[in-house]
Amino acid sequence: MLCFFLQKAEAARPVIDNERVTVFDVTLLKGKAIPAKPNRFDVVRVYVTGGMIRTTQPDGKSIVMTRRTGDAVFEPKGTGVGEELVSGGDAREKLSSS
């Protein structure tokens, strides 16, 4: 199962969850941070709707980047980042792990 904390997030809903893959549809809301947690599996984020997003590493370092529709980010197992929408309308992403 992908990131337990996503199961509890108001803006995340499971799309696919089986023995091979888990996919969440996540809406990033301005000012509502999703905390950084280590991933148990490799994760791919695909931005359905982009925006200015603050990405925070588990060590607390953060960077603000513009993510565009179609951007994809790979996170190896054991890593994990927190995210927060800084500006723009609600951003959406699909998170997949296997």
Image (spheres, rainbow, N blue to C red):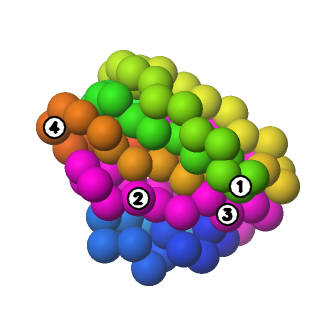
Looking at the image, residue 9 lies above or below residue 49: below
Residue appearing at x 46%, y 24% in the figure: 65
- Furthest residue toward left: 89
Res 2 → quadrant: bottom right
Amino acid type at image mark 1: Pro
Kindly state the secondary structure of the residue where label 2 is placed.
loop
The answer to whether the residues at label 1 and label 4 have Cβ atoms under 8 Å apart is no
From the top left corner, tell me how far across and down residue 82 is, in percent. Answer: 55, 53
The answer to which of marks 1 and 4 sits earlier in the sequence is: 1
Residue appearing at x 31%, y 39% in the figure: 86
Residue appearing at x 66%, y 52% in the figure: 60
The answer to which of marks 2 and 4 sits earlier in the sequence is: 2
Visible in this render: residue 29?
Answer: yes
Disc 3 to disc 4, how far (Cα)? 25 Å
Disc 1 to disc 4, how far (Cα)? 26 Å
Closer to the camera: disc 3 or disc 1? 1
Residue 21 covered by magenta stretch: yes
Seen from the viewer's position, the closer of residues 16 and 94 is: 94
Closer to the camera: disc 2 or disc 4? 2
Amino acid type at image mark 2: Ala
Seen from the viewer's position, the closer of residues 97 and 32 is: 32
Disc 2 to disc 1, how far (Cα)? 13 Å
The residue wearing badge 4 is: 89
Amino acid type at image mark 4: Gly
The answer to whether the residues at label 3 and label 1 have Cβ atoms under 8 Å apart is yes
From the top left corner, tell me how far across and down residue 45 is, in percent. Answer: 54, 39
Seen from the viewer's position, the closer of residues 10 and 36 is: 36
Disc 3 to disc 1, how far (Cα)? 7 Å
The residue wearing badge 2 is: 33
The answer to which of marks 2 and 1 sits earlier in the sequence is: 2
Residue appearing at x 34%, y 29% in the figure: 52
| Magenta range | 19-46
